[in-house]
Image: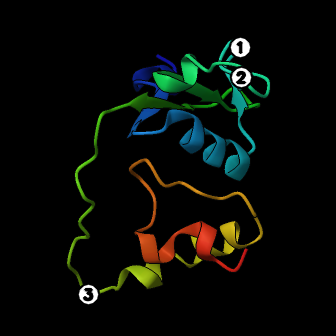
Amino acid sequence: MDHEQAFPVIRQTVLDTTDPRRLAEFYRQLFGLRYRPGDEPPGPGQPDPNGQDWLVLKSPAGGAALAFQKVGELPEATLPSGPVPLDRRLPGMISACSTRSSCSPKGGRGYPPQRYHPGQCGT
């Protein structure tokens, strides 16, 4: 049996969010992903029904994708306690976002707490 066939494959990770389009745009720009056909943003002034429910981003190389699912509200994020402060674990994330003027992941889980919000990295 081929080694690659011996393990399950991660097809996508789903993030809960109160604003699927905004969070999808953040990760699309950050990682250079592309919308699944049909999930692209509509033109200016056009309704965005997909952006109010479920969106999928795919890697141009065909790797795992990210999906964004709308939820009514998110519980407040809590940080685990431990010997390494959060700010020592996130310098790469902050650095990567410091050059992106539209980095704004508010509205979803899986992002740094507000004081490390990429949109506040001097852009």
- Quadrant of the drawing holding the C terminus: bottom right
| Picture coordinates of residue 18, whole percent (x, y) | 40, 39
Observer-side mark, 2 or 1, equals 2
Tell me the amino acid under the disc marked 1. Pro
SS for callout 3? loop
Left or right of residue 15: residue 58? right
Residue to which mark 1 is pinned = 37
Left or right of residue 102: residue 24? left
Q: CA distance from mark 2 to mark 1?
A: 7 Å
Residue at 41% of width from left, 53% of height from top? 110
Asked if labels 1 and 2 touch by Cβ distance under 8 angstroms, the answer is yes
Mark 1 Cα-neighbour bin, 10 Å: few <14, some 14–19, many ≥20: few
As drawn, the label of residue 83 is 3
| Picture coordinates of residue 112, whole percent (x, y) | 45, 66
Residue to which mark 2 is pinned = 40
Residue at 59% of width from left, 57% of height from top? 104
Q: CA distance from mark 1 to mark 3?
A: 44 Å
For this rendering, which residue is in front, 110 or 72? 72
